[in-house]
Image: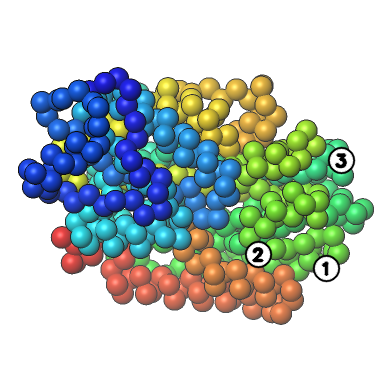
Amino acid sequence: MTANRFVAPNAFDDQPVVRPRHRTALGLGLALALLCGGCQRVENPPVSLQLAISPGEGADQVSRSNIKRLATQIANEYMRNHPEVLLHLRILPEAELVESVRSRARLGAGPDLLISRVGPVDILEREGYLQAVDITPQQIDPLRIKFLDDFRDGKEYEALPFLLQPTVACYDRRRLPKPPATLNDLMTKAAEGVKVGLPLQMFELLWTASAFDADQPLLRLFRTRVKAESDWRGLSPADRARVEEWLGWLYRANIEPNVLFVESADELVDRLEKGQLDWISCNSTAIERIKRKLGSHLGVSVLPSGSEGRPARPMARLQLISFGRDSTPYQRRVATSFALFVLNDFSQSNLIGKAFGNMPVNQNVMVPVKDSPALAAMQASLEHSAVPTFNTGVGLRHYSIPLRQLIKQAVYGEQSPKAVAAAMEALAKRTFLDDLSRGVHAHSKPAGKP
């Protein structure tokens, strides 16, 4: 095989060709002839791996392009070192990811590797479409991967952390030369005419709850995996009071004419670009997109702290690497090898420059915070961020639609903080008991899994 390797054809098509796992000798020969073209003959056919990638829900075109470019580079680097491997990349919107994996896996053609945020992986793992992988301490320990133990199941890993996407504040320096340090400062600036944008999504809005110490009670309330013998635990009286205080603050914030609550984090970015807002909370993957519009006028900082100076605790997004159930033993070994490659120091260092807004999980990699105020803000945000795992945080995404409706009732004063807090507790209890009755608890697998 020549040294000039490539990502397989149809790598980024919306509907790539699905290649069955088991081919006839003639079909395999034809497929290799088409794939290799003018390549030199090899004694053994290459092993083919299917890699599905989802940049995340609502990811804008800039973020999608960055992920494509990074994935292509890493895939080609790996194939140059491993000429016996052929990687097929497929980019999917998060909204289509779960059903795509389900439908392909039912045909025995599910992806060998999956890169996506925690929510879809949690669903697919619990439904039995993914499989844990065995990696030795000698292989994984030198990489010093953050949050690795949160995905450990005995000696195996249900998934591997891949990259982090912190939440920061993005603002227009022309309207706000200095970012507000506290939540009270932010509201003062709004009263002075600065247009402030906040999302109605619980996952993206939780950082404001941290100013009232209401974030941790809500994360515990909406845990997604429970032990079979667990009893329901609602909010304690003290926690309920904190949640109600936060909900009351949301209503008071919305009364301020210059504070605007919008449906999604993407809408906040769009309004900042158009000059309709001056300050927003934003995910780090949006920074490059906003910078193309605002240029040097874009400011990036950590989110405002609470009144007592406690740092904000936003939810960071976490991308995972997980493994499909349909791989052959050899494909599984190669998939594991590729996963370790994308987690090594070289590949993780490339994250910072090639896909700005993504932060490495490999703690051997030094983030050049002195070279970029935005990187410094992202690093500082991560030091206090809550990171979703199968047990924590991801529940806020699973129940995002009903939670958004409850948040709206608090923001627009349709229900009292006490009534909204009670409704949140009832929603959490209902989903808890439903999951318990179905046996959906930690490390459970469906009875019908092949």
Q: Identify the disc placed on residue 174.
A: 3
How many numbered marks have been drawn onto this rendered protein structure?
3
Residue 176 location, x and y as percent?
Answer: 85, 43
Q: Nearer the viewer, residue 38 or 220?
A: 38
The residue to which callout 2 is attached is: 263
Q: List x then y, in percent, for residue 131.
A: 24, 50
Q: Residues within 10 Å of mark 2 (few under 14, many from 20)?
A: few
Q: Which residue is mark 1?
A: 255
Residue at the image position 63 percent from the left and 60 percent from the top: 264
Question: Which secondary structure lies at badge 3?
Answer: loop
Image quarter where the N terminus lies is top left
Judging depth in this view, the residue of 137 and 405 nearest the camera is: 405
Q: Is residue 411 above or below residue 130?
A: below
The amino acid type found where label 1 is placed reads Ile
- The x, y position of residue 94, in whole percent, is 45, 56
- Indicate which disc residue 28 carries: none
Residue 272 horizontal/vertical position (percent): 75, 50
> What residue do we see at 41% from left, 45% from top?
12
- Tag 2: amino acid: Glu
Taking the spot 30% from the left edge, 20% from the top edge, the residue there is: 3
Of callouts 1 and 2, which one flags the residue occurring earlier in the amino acid sequence? Answer: 1
Q: Residues within 10 Å of mark 1 (few under 14, many from 20)?
A: some
The Cα atoms of the two marked residues, 1 and 2, are separated by 17 Å
Q: Earlier in the sequence, mark 3 or mark 1?
A: 3
